Image (cartoon, helix red, strand yellow):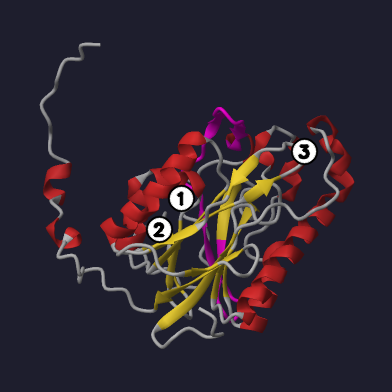
Amino acid sequence: MSENRPTKGMVRCAMTETVNAYDKMPARVKDLSELVPHLEDLRAANVAHNIDLIRQAAARGVQVVGLGEFCTTPYFAMSRHPMWLSLAEDPLNGPSITAFSEVAAELEVVIVAPIYERCRQDGRLFNTAVVIDADGMVLGGYRKTHVPDGSNEKGSFHERFYYEGPDGPAPVQVPGANISNNLMFPVFRTRWLPIGVSICYDRHFGGVHRSLAENGAHLIFAPAVTFGEQSERMWELEFPVDAARYRVWIAGSNRLGAEAPWGQHFYGRSYVAAPDGRPEVDRSTDKLVIFDVPARVDRYNDPSGWRLVEDRRDDLYGARTRKTRRTD
């Protein structure tokens, strides 16, 4: 994949695999309050870092870039601290999206930018992936539907302290940009190909990728910040199964490395799953995974002979089953 443009009929895409770029983080969790006067500097450092990665990708012929979950901040949900609430921003014209929109228009690159959203209507907080078209226009966003709160053998995640799951669709800025019939799981018609998004914990719930595929997504970006033994085992399994089952491309990205002051290591291992396996990827550019996706995806012509979309017995899945008595 050394050439700077994809072959005819293909769209060159990339996803990031990086961590917080702000280099003045305190060494101890109890000292996080020292950051309060510098939170805008922290955000600006991460926006600049991601824009540099977008420029590197564009120089390799990339036309679509998927950034990481909470791309403008560290993964602050490792602990509870109210100061992070002030970093939530408007998903249409906040400081991060304004900067990303400018570079999208300059480079003619579609950008999927997951940010910390403060809803402009009611002030509610969400984990939102904003989709920006290649002309810099904000098409709309997807709000993370499934919100975890718990711990594993590696550490804790307190996401419900910071944001909630949506009870309605995220804003769509451009009429007609969302081609999905399920407004909770939008599919955006971008210049290069139709894109859907799932975010981290969403990947464990099969209806998400099914809905995105059935509503026209050719490529699903699945940014995550994840760690833990079971997470790492399942990471290698979930995307390939859904890609084959629903005949869609899924790009799963994870942070790689550790972030002060929490010190939690994120295992990275970002990869792409295609309907027929794993395509060639280019990792020669640090912190980027580059891959090509066909501009047109045929969900019905499976070379394996499987006809999963046509042969699925949806009439049975809602059937009433016989009640059984528990014996435990």
| CA separation in Å, label 2 and label 3 | 38 Å
- Residue at x 52% of width, y 86% of height: 5
Is 230 placed left or right of 75 in the picture? Answer: left
Label 2 secondary element: loop
Give the quadrant of residue 249: bottom left
User: Which residue was labeled with disc 1?
Assistant: 168
How crowded is the residue under tag 3: few (<14 C-alpha within 10 Å), some, or many (20+)? some
Instruction: Tell me the magenta residue range.
Output: 130-159
Magenta run includes residue 285: no
Amino acid bearing label 1: Gly
> Residue 261 — which label?
3
How crowded is the residue under tag 2: few (<14 C-alpha within 10 Å), some, or many (20+)? some
- Residue at x 44% of width, y 40% of height: 233
Q: Earlier in the sequence, mark 2 or mark 3?
A: 2
How many numbered circles are shown? 3
User: Which residue was labeled with disc 2?
Assistant: 183
State the residue in front, 161 or 25.
25
Q: Earlier in the sequence, mark 2 or mark 1?
A: 1
> Residue 198 — which label?
none
